[in-house]
Amino acid sequence: MDVPAVNTSFTHLQPQSWAGQNHMTPAVSPASWQPNATCPPPYHYPYMNPKHQSSTEGSLAPMTHEPVTCSGARPQSLYWDTSQQSYQGVCKSVPEISNMKTQEMLLGSCSLPTSPTSNSKSESRYGLDPQFLPSVVHVIKDDRVQWEGKVFVSKSKSSVPPLSSTRCTLEDRGNATPHFIRCTTYCFPVDVKSAQKSHLPLGATVLPLAVPERGERSVPVCEAGDCVKGCGHCGAFMSPAMGWQDCGQRFYCPFCDTLSEVPWQSYQPTNQGRRVDNERKPELSLGSYEILEKQMSNAAVLMLAIDVSASAMRTGHLDLICQQICSQLQILQGTEGADQSDLRVGVMTYDSRIHLYNLSPALSRPHMMIITDCEEMELPFSEGLLVPLKDCRHKVERVLQEIALFKPKSDERCASQDLPVSAAVKIFQASESPGKLLIFHSSPLTECTEDKNSSVFFSSSKLKSIFQGPDSSTSLAKECVNQGCCIHTFVFSDQEVGGAWPGHIPFLTGGGLICYNSLQMEMEMEQERFQADLSRCVNMQMAFKAQLKVFVSKEMRISGCYGAFIAGPDTSRVAMAALDWRTAMAFEFTHNKSLDEARGVAIQFALSYSTSSGESRKRIHTVTLPSSHQLLDTFRSSQAESLLTFYCKKMYSLALESPLQSLREELQTEVTEMLACFRRHNCTTAVSPGQLVLPQFLKALPVYINSLRKSEVLLPGLRSSVQQRLQLRCLIVSMDTMSTASQFYPHILPLPVSGGNTNMPCVEETVRCTASSLDQGGLYLIYCPLALLLWVGSRVPPQTLLQLFNTNSFSSLTSGKIRLPVLENFLSISTRDLICSLQSQAAVTLQLKMVKEGDNCEESLQHLLVEDKSPNGGASYADFLFHLHVNSLRLIV
């Protein structure tokens, strides 16, 4: 009897390599490193046989040497295994099963009575109780208990770091801290066969411009002439990974396996293998540092492009847009008596043509020039198009005031959203400057010449994915990258289906796309959101004309790079128009030959960029990881959230070329092979076939992977538009580890409902992402980087509703976007403070949405309850874990 499949994507296929992928494995211990008593053990979880499911509750309970007996279950003994440093559960009454088909029948034919409090969407079709399965909430809490308020020292070949959500101090002592680099494993397997056998990807996620937390040391900056030069053969920069020889006269480069002579000008003797000036030189002692180059480039500029077509005029948004721009320019220039900004600013307007404005201080008023031939655009002049803000602010304000007086022709066609980008690139090229282009587009989006309708999502035979931009947009984005032109587009059109999506160029250039429903005077909340987004965009410090070069030990090579950029033929180099402190990328590594276990593996990321003021800088991040012959070391040093981030970036990048169904199947196959390998090679203690066994740091991996598989990007649903999917993919693919983890497992924060409760709700008090966690008498704030919901139960006390919403009637509440009233009581104040705190963590301004229990708006909440069945048809966490377990057992037998 075959095991019933949850859906077609859950049916196990014979393992096979992904197209273009080399299987490899991460790792975490040097040659001298030996697992000690504190090394995390594999965790053994409840029997996946539903008949004995409840009998294993003790394996997740506090340690005990007494037999654990649960109601309606057979007794099970639980004991501490000193050899494995883990808890083992052995059910005496489970017969030895040698026939795999018999085992499948046993697992698939039994059921467990459901709990009275269980929600139908979170129940397992195989009778597994989700409450007994590994929990992300528990994993996060346990990590906080271990690391909260402590110091994690990041040194060469260090251990697995704290989770990204844990607040602890990270100290750089030779390895870049996890703020900048997180690896899928912190111990690489020595040889390629072990790497392929484990099916653990060897990768690293880098956040080059991450900002250290308060109390941590900022990245030191040194002058280029004062730094010890790096390797002259491969170009790698100096780092603690270099090995000194001959009393400091030469050093060994792990990236190209060569010896280099030290120039006499920078020579210093060594003492016990370290230079005597080691502590005075960041490049010798720290994993992260910055080099300030002597040459200066032109400072970044700010260009404003405003849609003034007839359809844009009819929307009525123009006045508000111009008002907000004027306010931001005034803030940029500063108050009277303060240092006035030297930022150069330009303005253009556009319909079917381009209107340029000469803002030269020598003119009494701005002059306008119209470009009608937009096919082969040539600038009629370049002087006066970009002028320092302190010299032209009043002229810019005058242009913005007179825009409303334009009288476009009523039969004029809608403006193209790519037209101002072409003009801006010409202007930036003429001034030889990088910068930001802010586009304010109000007219309907123009159709693309290529077929981009929703049906493409549901067809696996299409050679060109819906996620791919038009060739014209890709070419234009490449021009922007070469010039360092970053595009930010604000769209005020209500149109969604049938129009060309204008976000391809912005996201490929380090910018972004933000859409608004309406900015009419009655839509005050949308106006506030636009104001906050515009302010963040204008004031965001960015690195322009960024070039990222990756070096890795000679025994390894870079097999893939994933993120929000245009991938080139060289996977070790990435070029970006601009980069901010939130943007992360992932790189995958493959063995060329076996690693030296004594040396381990070294990885270096070198980012070259220019600042807004024109300074040329290089930021260097280096990590040195151990390698091991033992796959157990590799598994024990892997981290679920790092694997999730890597897989997310890889799958979302491959979605440009591969069918979504195949990506979901390949992702499940990889994880299944991974768990089968761990069970086959690393479980030395006899374990019942029905029992789930997971590495310590990968307990949360199944729920993360299931959430990724059924995300709206990889599992299309009929209720989401193509534009929404495109937007989600571009936003998520550049997220860092902490944001990615919370996106695929949102925080559900219970709010106090009793008047006597004076405890401030905080992110540490989260509950599991399942409908059964939501009490009808409770209030819950649900947060992820792209959504903020307030769920109100039908039995919330009237007094609580009065304190928060200024009404004591549940029926009078209306689901949808809201702004909480300002009331002077603890619940109102603490909730609004918590919302502000969560808003500050998001890359875009989130609109609070209220969801009443039983309301139609609850579907927006169902997408965030990732342990339950998805509205799009994705399986629940319990069912997915069941299939992972059964399919991994198939591979073992």
Image: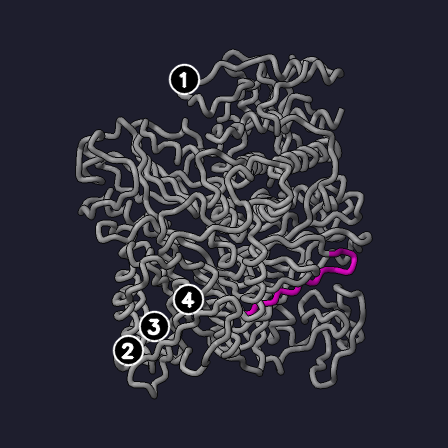
Q: Earlier in the sequence, mark 3 or mark 1?
A: 1
Q: In screen coordinates, is 783 left or right of 598? A: left
Report which residue position mark 2 lands on.
Answer: 394
Q: Is residue 694 visible?
A: yes
**What range of the chain is rendered magenta?**
545-557
Question: Mark 3 or mark 1, which is nearer to you?
Answer: 3
Q: Position of residue 646 (x, y in %)?
A: 60, 48
Question: Mark 3 or mark 2, which is nearer to you?
Answer: 2
Secondary element under disc 2, as helix, strand or loop, is helix
Report which residue position mark 1 lands on.
Answer: 116
Report which residue position mark 3 lands on.
Answer: 332
Report which residue position mark 4 lands on.
Answer: 353
Q: Position of residue 132 (x, y in %)?
A: 52, 26
Secondary element under disc 1, as helix, strand or loop, is loop
Which residue is at the far bottom?
Answer: 362
**Secondary structure character of the magenta stretch overall:** strand
Please identify the quadrant where the N terminus is shown. Answer: top right
